[in-house]
Amino acid sequence: MREMNKPTTGAANPLSRRSFLKTAAATGVTASYFLEPATVNASPFNLPIGLQLYTVGPELDKDPIGTLKRVAAVGYKQVELSPLSKISNADLKKALDDNGLKNPSGHYMLFDLMANLQQKIEVAHQFGQQFMIVTVPWVADTSRFKTDPADGQMGLFRAIINGLTIDDWEWNADQFNKIGEEVKKAGLELGYHNHNFEFKDYGSTTGYDEFIRLTDPQFVKLELDCGWMVVAGLDPALYLSRYPDRYRLLHIKDFKKGFTPRTTLMDPSPGAPVATELGRGSIEYSRIFAAARKGKIAAIFVEQEPPFTEMPALEAIKVDYEYLKKMTG
């Protein structure tokens, strides 16, 4: 989960977890699907393998230039930027160019886009991005959340994502539609990146399904984090099949077997998901890729969640790359 920057003060039928279970039963998809060996020949993408740089965030903080060189040496041809502040945008762009790393997508915070949209659009153009991806929803009034000052901005963040109401999701959809229209005028595309908390039930729907229903497909695209959707107990292949024109980017990650599906983020209770390298966990990607192949995926990014307990991050991204290379090469 990315660190937050400090805040400045078309409609398709929703696919709820309830309807997912009905669809899964009808199609023979069960929980064991996630653990079954591949039965589909998955070579779905003629795309370069990318890396979400959040995966090597601490390394970038310590040595931005050297870390980008090592990322490129693994074989990655594209990266997705998270907010970086250790070097200037100009120096970062030069380092990307020097290492042959394209940057088709960047991650942004909604409150930043609301306050400084044109500035952020200029940043996206500077890096040659096509997609401006928002990583978490926000709320109209943060003062309704009372947090311990000792918990800092992460305390506020946790309070917000755990306290989102269906009205908050409607407000977010409205903000995305407005911002997405301006982003499109600038020749770019706005999108939303899911985690697992979006799939909390609100009666007959979820925040995510309402967000999709209420956002205009011409202004708001989607980046599917396959791993977090599985953690929520849902099937990325079904969502990809339901909304083939909305999903433009994929995040590819894995979690070890044995986690308990949940819609709470940063929840340390028993059965919490434990991240691992691709191919060493519980998620079988062949069927997911087969569904994605029928859509309009423009880029794929490895994103491994910390902590890195079995090997350093710069070694883990090699394992992740080789896994995807075998599946997508």
Image (spheres, helix red, strand yellow):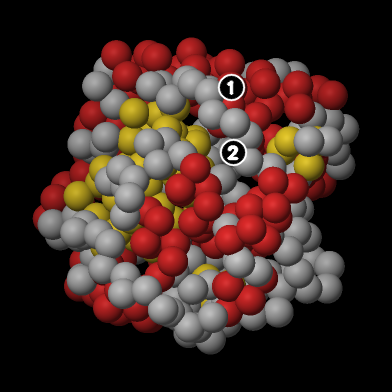
Q: Is residue 321 visible?
A: no
Write the residue at 72% across / 24% down.
168
Q: Residue 85, how many percent across, how many down?
A: 41, 44
Q: Is residue 224 visible?
A: yes
Write the residue at 26% across / 68% down.
43
Q: Residue 173, how many percent across, how many down?
A: 59, 22
Pointer 1 residue: 214
Residue at the limit of the structure toward the front, as seen here: 26
Callout 1 crowding tier (Cα within 10 Å): few <14, some 14–19, many ≥20: many
Q: Nearer the viewer, residue 131 or 166?
A: 166
Pointer 2 residue: 136
Q: Residue 240, how many percent across, how many down?
A: 46, 48
In the rendered view, tell whether residue 267 sits above or below residue 219: below
The amino acid type found where label 2 is placed reads Val
Write the residue at 49% across / 73% down.
284
Dividing the picture into quarters, in which one does residue 293 lie? bottom left
Question: Considering the image in quadrants, where does the N terminus appear?
Answer: bottom right
